[in-house]
Image: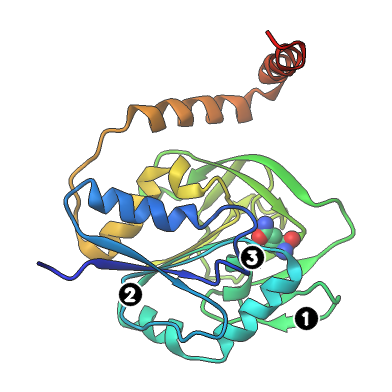
Amino acid sequence: MAEPVSIALLYPELLGTYGDGGNALVLAQRLLWRGVAAEVVDVRAGEPIPRGCQIYVMGGGEDAPQSLAARELRATPALLGAVDGGAAVLAVCAGLQVLGHRFAGDDGKVHEGLGLLDCETHRDDGPRRVGEVVVTADAALDLPDLTGYENHGGITTLGAAAHPLGRVVVGHGNGAGDGTEGIVKGRVVGTYLHGPVLARNPALADHLLSSVLGPLAPLDDPDVDALRKERLHAARHPHMHMPQLASGWRRLIRGH
Ligand code: GLN
């Protein structure tokens, strides 16, 4: 039997606050549905990062654990080596921030990132950027609109030659006032979208998978199509959905 495709989930105990570990499960499941063997390998702080995985996934987290994750990552050339060798990376929110050149930490200090992505993250005094997000993906990626939610204090500025994942239609994304969301460099994708983003956007999951495995057979999933339709509509028309939400809560409280 062929070796399973290996998906490394980096530091789930540090970068697991927003359920982004689900992205690794989505990648593995979409392969299994196609009859391709796949495994998810959890890599915890203090453990070596395996170099032979095809995809590396990092999630969002709070400021202090995020700084620890950055320290772990910078202590080894393993992730940089894997990317040089052709691996793909999905990094969400705190994950995106630590892959940049530097980011603002919980201690008000600037922390060094891995420098894999040409971006840096700072803070302002404003409120956290929280809520549903809709993104039009960069045309070169040929992806349908992306849906997710964001929850971050950091503001990410892209380097002059860096490519964003897309442009925000609803929400903040990178929050730098230039309308950009996320960053893409080859097979490395950074985004602020939680959801998990690959559960809400299977086309992005297949984009990552095919970037390392080549073309994949399409998969039909009417449940996800319905979820996407509902989330995209709710984000674009929040005023139409709030009354439904409120009446749903009223029913729940009344018990019928
Ligand atoms: N701690 C970071 C921030 O607030 C990342 C948050 C997240 O991963 N959602 O900007």
Left of 77 or right of it: where is 5? left
Left of 123 or right of it: where is 71? left
Is the residue marked by circle 2 packed among few (<14), some (14-19), or many (20+) residues within 10 Å?
A: many
- Residue type of the residue flagged with mark 1: Val
Numbered tag placed on residue 110 in the rendering: 1
Which residue is at 35% across, 58% downward? 208
Instruction: Give the image location of residue 128, x and y in percent.
Output: 80, 52
* Front position in the image: 152 or 143: 152
Judge: label 3 CB < 8 Å from ligand 1.
yes
49 up-or-down from 209: above or below = below
Q: Is residue 186 visible?
A: no
Instruction: Give the image location of residue 51, x and y in percent.
Output: 36, 83
Give SS at disc 1: strand
**Residue that extends furthest to the front in the rendered view of this protein:** 255
122 up-or-down from 141: above or below = below
Instruction: Give the image location of residue 209, x and y in percent.
Output: 30, 58
Is the residue marked by circle 1 packed among few (<14), some (14-19), or many (20+) residues within 10 Å?
A: few
* Front position in the image: 61 or 178: 61
Q: Which residue is mark 3?
A: 94
- Residue type of the residue flagged with mark 3: Ala
- Image quarter (top left, top right, bottom left or bottom right) of the N terminus: bottom left
- Spatial CA distance of label 2 from label 3 is 21 Å
Is the residue marked by circle 3 packed among few (<14), some (14-19), or many (20+) residues within 10 Å?
A: many
First in sequence: mark 3 or mark 1? 3
Q: Which residue is mark 2?
A: 53
Q: Mark 3, mark 1: which one is toward the viewer?
A: 3
Give SS at disc 2: loop
Q: Mark 2, mark 1: which one is toward the viewer?
A: 2
First in sequence: mark 2 or mark 1? 2
Instruction: Give the image location of residue 247, x and y in percent.
Output: 72, 12
